[in-house]
Amino acid sequence: MRSGSVGRSRDVLRSLAYVALGVAGAAGNTGCYSDSCADSYWCEVPPPEPGPCDGDPTTAAALDLCGVFVSEEGHDDSPGTKDAPVRTLQHAIGLAAHVRRNDQAPTRRVYACGGLFEEAISLPQGVDLWGGRLCAGGDWSYGGPLDGPNALTVIAPPVGIPVRVLGGEDAVIAGDDATSVIFGVRAVAADASARDGKSSIAMLLEHGARAIVQSSVILAGDGKDGEPGEDAPSFRATAGVVGNNGADACTADAARGALPVVTVCDDGIESTGGEGGRGSLETGSDGTSGLPEPVGTPDNRGLGGSGASSMACKEGEPGAKGADAERAAGAVDPGLLGVDGWIGVRGENGKPGGVGQGGGGGGGGKGRDPARDACQTGRPPGGAAGGSGGSGGCGGKGGKGGDYGGASIGIVALQGSFLTVDASTVLGAKGGNGGVGGTGQWGGFGWDGGNGGRGSDVAVWARGCHGGLGGEGGRGGDAGGGLGGHSFGIGSVGASVAILENATVSPGQAGTGGLGGSASPETTFGNGANGTALFWYRFDAPDPEPPQ
């Protein structure tokens, strides 16, 4: 019979079976009794005798029929007996989890020598791993206390999570008895060795897994610092375009105003200079305003200049500068636990700067004044046209958010899992620092408006007016800093965790949050939050997906 969970005392089970007996049958039943005169009796059933595989791993004999044996000196072509052990832990686990030759039931136990195994293992729920065995003498007895010279089986892969306990469909058997006992093991995670390439996690219980960690040491490595967010280009964003010149006076009866110029920016937003005013005989028309219309009430609004009437025309106004984007927020969410470990949070990306407004179109001139005409007899009488406004510069791109620092977590327990830590040490190490946010790009320059058309030497009112200068694009926003890496002895989400009094579970040092782009240490907004250091941290369960 398979051993019960290690460290759990076996209480004597008393099954009381209800038996309905007649008077004649009651007279011949020894060991049964009744507390009334009725003809129903309660019979005491003795507890089952312990099997050869039952017992405590510190004292129970290691037998071939009870498990698969693994040693640094073994070979994976061997059957996994005491005299012919296998070489790798994962191969031994596979043998222990499946039916043996001659249709014998799986042993569901692995006996491992003290020594170094540089492999990451996946342990199906319901398979035990009893490490720290003394193999030199051939009896495979337990090697002694945690600090002994040959005490523990060291599981220390160069990458990956050293010990993963599988649950759900990967369990060997279902029900409350499907508990894996991990005994006499030293699981050591390398720095930044988890799937994300930044975190370090020594053990992970998948959804629904059940495990007891006893007389073992579980050590996470350091998390890696987050990479800084990518800076936006150091050169300025696309500049505006020079406005078109207006037609000269005396070249048409009504000279059309200069056509607008357009700058198309990467995000599809356009900056358009205002059209120049038309030149005519009696009154020049006004230029149109530049686009896009500015937000708020800036001093420069890119209005079109007025055409000549009783007074000479006016130039178009300069376009408004695009709005500078503010620094984006730093990462503050604690992140999520999943089958790959912990996933942190990057800082927000910087927003693009606003597009500069195009300059207003210049007003058009007129060809006739009350005193005299501007144009010589025989030439078209219209005044000069106004120049179009220059287009504004594009807004700068935002920087990219700083990456999160890697976490350092001894044991991760996911939804529905059950973890007991008994007479063991579980330690987190140092979380990585969050990465600094990237810097934003400077906006492009606005460009000059076009010249108004030339007028007559003797008639100032006949000339067209210049278009306005396009507005400068706004600076792209600096990005937020990344989250600092956590340091936990145990991190769980929706799991049942029991830490017994004789266990030591401690965090290391949490990482600091990354600074926002271009931020000083005294700046607060835009910085990522510091990581958290606790012996046990319970993450909130993710929100359920809405029904389809």
Image (tube, rainbow, N blue to C red):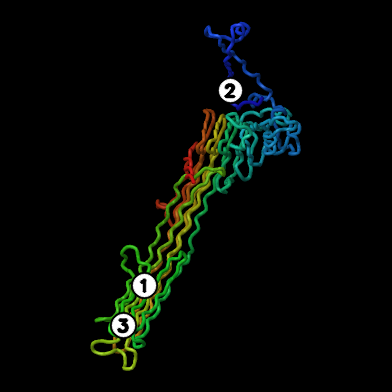
Q: Are marks 1 and 3 in contact (CB under 8 Å)?
A: no
**Residue flagged by tag 3: what amino acid is it?**
Gly
Q: Are marks 3 and 2 in contact (CB under 8 Å)?
A: no
* Image side of residue 508 versus residue 116, left or right: left
**Mark seen at residue 359:** 1
**Residue flagged by tag 1: what amino acid is it?**
Gly
Compare residues 527 and 66 and report the one nearer the observer. 66
Label 1 crowding class (10 Å Cα cut-off): few <14, some 14-19, many 20+?
many
**Residue flagged by tag 2: what amino acid is it?**
Ser
Q: Tell which circle, 2 or 1, labels the residue nearer the N-terminal end.
A: 2
70 to 470, vertically: above or below: above
Q: Tell which circle, 3 or 2, labels the residue nearer the N-terminal end.
A: 2
Secondary structure state at the residue bearing disc 2? loop
288 to 519, vertically: above or below: below
Label 3 crowding class (10 Å Cα cut-off): few <14, some 14-19, many 20+?
many
Tell me the CA gap for discs 1 and 3: 19 Å
Residue 41 drawn at (x, y percent): 57, 11
Compare residues 138 and 173 and report the one nearer the observer. 173
Residue occupying the point 51% across, 48% down: 405
Compare residues 152 and 28 and report the one nearer the observer. 28
Q: Quadrant of the N terminus?
A: top right
Residue under numbered circle 3? 365
Is residue 290 shown to the viewer in this render?
Answer: yes
Residue 305 drawn at (x, y percent): 31, 76
Residue 303 drawn at (x, y percent): 32, 72
Residue under numbered circle 2? 9
Where is residue 319, by image quadrant? bottom left
**Mark seen at residue 174:** none
Q: Tell which circle, 1 or 3, labels the residue nearer the N-terminal end.
A: 1
Residue 256 drawn at (x, y percent): 36, 81
